[in-house]
Image (cartoon, helix red, strand yellow):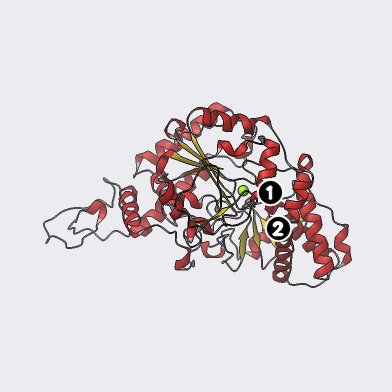
Amino acid sequence: MSCEKLWKVGRSLWHKSSKSAAPLWSSAKVQAFACGGLASRGLNPTDPPSAKCCQSATERDASAARVSPAIPPPPSGSNHRLQVVGKKRGEDSLGVSGRSFSSTAPKIDTKAYLWSRYNEMKRLVHDLIPPGVCSLLNPSTIYANNEVSLAEVDIYGFDYDYTLAHYSSALDTMIFNKARDFLIEHYKYPQGISKYDYIPNFAARGLHYDIQKGLLMKIDAFHYIQPGTVYRGLRPVPDEDVLQLYGGTHHVPLHQVSAPFPLKGPKMKQFMDVFSLPEMTLLAVANDFFISNDIEYDPVHLYKDVSDAVAMVHIKGYMYKWIMQDLEKYIVRGDETYAVLHRLVSNGKKLFLITNSPFSFVDKGMKYMVGKDWREFFDVIIVQADKPHFFNDCVKPFRRLDSNGDLQWDKIKNLDKGQIYKQGNLFDFLRLTGWRGSKVLYFGDHLYSDLAVSVGFLFFACLF
Ligand SMILES: [Mg+2]
């Protein structure tokens, strides 16, 4: 499809959308920034109250006040139009935009209305955009982001792993091999699994895994399984088989699509960071081995074992050790890292770092990528932050590390430049720095762990 045709499709969509009610994007946008709307609540309605962000009551009220006007009212001029006929004030109050209405018309079911608008827009997208058109997008092209004005951003925050530091595929191979061998040595999985090597590009970030069925797949934003993306082991599952497996539909109910932190959903796990690539591949090859050799097994046990094996690689610090022993092999270094940080600071911007990795590891990598004075770029450095709990729980206090990396016992009253802090929480971070709002932009690679910055405390912007 030519660019011109794509433009026409977009224009047509816009016209069809704008003819009726308030634009859907406005409500979607608000949900993404509302506390718990996406990361801690929207994806899984079964989340316990503890999953809520640590906003103060005052801030929650303020946020609710900002959110409510964006909920699209029923369209005027449609069948939903309200007629004021002089009933008593307050009767049949609908509460839209803070006003009361009296009406002889049937009550509007807002939920049903929003669902009908959602389905209508989805149908329009399906009708107007031919299948496969998205694959025409060139991944090497730079696309403009019209939502963020960098002129308004004064403070830049960064995650470390896969944000400031990018790792080569050699690291994926090492994680895969170590976890695979751990399965064999400690969980007594069949020796035959050792014949499987890591398969680069087999999996991509964002895929879902059906824990009970042992299927890896792509599920779209509407919770529909994408045809042609379902794999059992290393083999694709025909679309007609997928339909049968899911009761005649490609739709996966919301409550089955789990929130990733922690794993609460009983059926689906979504892999949200780049570190997950070896885990998905190991799941696929382990399934493939049992299926190919006609060995009966429980996919739930397999998932748990693979998950534990990969976690062991991280928990025992193997990954940190490998990288620190051979920075050139595992870190993809580019002069751009220094150039970007230098340019930001030269233009009076403030920088901060919030990472889950330990200081010794970050320090070695940053010295390799940016130089021995890398800390001078950052106004606040926080390591082992325990994201996403850093954003959600607001329990752990900040601790200071001395120059040897040892924990200190003094109470943290300021977050000073030149110091290294450990743990902490977002509430104290905002209180001590005063940084918040649209002047703060945070870069991260984890769609939920790092996005929690924006949904947890109104409002950092986040880029991935
Ligand atoms: Mg990261």
Residue 229 visible within the image? no
Q: Indicate yes or no: mark 1 CB to ligand 1 under 8 Å.
A: no
Q: Position of residue 344 (x, y in %)?
A: 53, 31
Residue identified by numbered label 2 = 314
Mark 2 or mark 1, earlier in chain: 2
The kind of residue on which mark 2 rests is: His
Residue type at mark 1: give it: Phe
Which quadrant is the C terminus positioned in? top right
Nearer to the camera, 415 or 252:
415
* On screen, residue 434 above or below 15: below
The image's mark for residue 148 is: none
Q: Nearer the viewer, residue 241 or 272?
A: 272
Dot 2 crowding, Cα within 10 Å, few <14, some 14–19, many 20+: few
Give the residue displayed 49% in from the left and 50% down from the top.
453
Q: CA distance from mark 2 to mark 1?
A: 13 Å
Q: Is residue 361 visible?
A: yes
Query: Residue at 55% of width from left, 39% of height from top?
Result: 378
Q: Position of residue 338 (x, y in %)?
A: 63, 32
Residue positioned 28% across, 52% down in the render: 80
The residue at which mark 1 appears reads as: 361
- Residue 115: image quadrant is bottom left
Question: Which SS class for mark 2?
Answer: helix
Identify the residue shown where x is 85% and y is 56%: 196
